Image: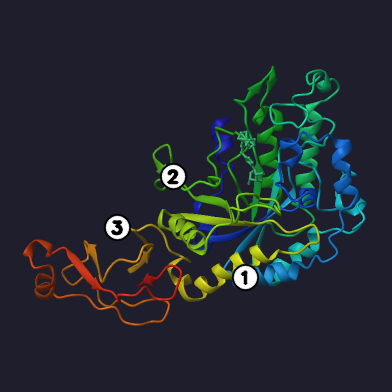
Amino acid sequence: MASDLRSLALPEEKKAWFTHDRLGMFVHWGLYALPGRHEWIKNYEQIDDQNYQAYFDHFDPDLYDPADWARRAKAAGMKYVVLTTKHHEGFCLWDSKHTDYKVTNTPYGKDLLRPFVDAFRAEGLRVGFYYSLIDWHHPDFPVDPHHPQRNAPDAAKRNEGRDVTRYAAYMRDQVRELLTDFGKIDVIWFDFSYPQRELNGLKGKGHRDWESEALVRTVRELQPDIIINNRLDLAGLPPDIVTPEQYVPRAWPERNGKRVTWEACHTLSGSWGYHRDEATWKSPEQLVQLLIDNVAMGGNLLMNVGPTARGTLDHRAKAALDVYADWMTLNARSIYGCTESKLPAPRDCRYTQNGNRLYLHIFNWPFRHIHLDGLGGGKVEYAQFLHDGSEVKWLPPSELTLWSNTEMEVRSDSLTLELPVKKPPVVVPVIE
Ligand code: H79
């Protein structure tokens, strides 16, 4: 049985596009855009269905223009997109046959998903669907440690009549819709399992609740080449991708001693859903460095935007996408098709590598010189900045002795680049 489960994992070669493309756009959009203070607001503020209904009754993103989002994603160098078709609140962005809690029943009254899929495909991006395992609206989803009503005096009683097997069937039905009606889908992103959580006698949820194995079989049957993320709590299934969240691993993540295909997801601002008053928007340096950090450890970056209740990207999100656009226009060669280098990177630098092309990303501008260990002795043929194609020269050992005033600095295995004193006008300079 276990080996049977293993056969559901996607073969390595079918993940080649994913590993090559490196940068994707995450989109978190739902009713939570209306309160505009985090997508977990129903949980954080313990809002019951009756009070949350105001956001359903006022959902009307009249300025929705997915072609604009898609153009901006493409300009930012993003090659795939993953949209929250349903987040933890349970609200569905498409016209699902299996629920009334969907966009077509709001004042907006139209399906949002097909225009989204069409717009991103038209820009040449691959399309993925996020689908929440957690559902704080569905009547069969048992109250648990993360549920908005978990602290109600009668929390345990609230589970009377809730049948999680019906909920698991509902998920399979919805996933079947999503993976049947919208053409080829490249990624499905389930979120998330918490079997070990417990609170006041309420238990967390995992593969038994979701019936994860049946869910994965449904997915594979409908979309044989789709990438399935690793949050279904299925120990026997080697994950197609591992997905650290708002976290930079210390090294290329491994599973059973073997390096895995991985993708870190990050926010522009700390929140996934649109958050009007948030103050922790990342700097241009942080945005670009996150991408490089992941690729330098063999991983992808899925960077999130949270559109507003009107259906727009607000000015801070646009500015952040422009940061990627400006940087990727000049430096994408150091990202696409690149992976970790075996060479040790100098202080405050990261390497990425594509065949015999090595890319040095300089996070903190040093004074005049940078020493590349392991690259001495004629290993480097030519060096240039990516942002302007200008040559970067290196010091002959005699000159290094002259400047350093000691022979100790000269090492036959290293090469010393000569840098301009001033940092070039690019967020993170790259030397190829
Ligand atoms: O969709 C986005 C998030 O809403 C969702 N995954 C991304 C992609 C997510 N949110 N939290 N988590 C995944 C992990 C769980 C975090 C928790 Fe907690 C820490 C749950 C309990 C402690 C956050 C902090 C929620 C309550 C306190």
Going from N to C along the chain, the mark reached first, 1 or 3, is: 1
**Looking at the image, is 247 positioned above or below residue 27?**
above
* Quadrant including the N terminus: top right
Q: The disc labelled 2 sits on which kind of residue?
A: Pro
Q: Position of residue 229 (x, y in %)?
A: 59, 45
Disc 3 target residue:
347
User: Which SS class for mark 3?
Assistant: loop
Asked if residue 56 is positioned above or below residue 347 in the image, the reply reads above
Label 1 close to label 3 by CB (< 8 Å):
no
* Nearer to the camera, 208 or 383: 383
- N-term-proximal mark, 2 vs 1: 1
The residue tagged 2 is: 253
Image quarter of residue 399: bottom left
**Callout 2: helix, strand or loop?**
loop
Q: Residue at x 62, y 70 (%)?
A: 74
Secondary structure under tag 1 reads: helix
Of callouts 3 and 2, which one flags the residue occurring earlier in the amino acid sequence? 2
The quarter of the image that holds ligand 1 is top right
Q: Position of residue 320 (x, y in %)?
A: 59, 65
Amino acid, disc 1: Lys
17 with respect to 207 (left or right):
left
**Color scheme of the displayed model:** rainbow
Image height of 27 relative to 166, above or below: below
Residue 124 shows in the view: no
The residue at label 3 has a CB less than 8 Å from ligand 1: no
Residue hosting label 1: 74
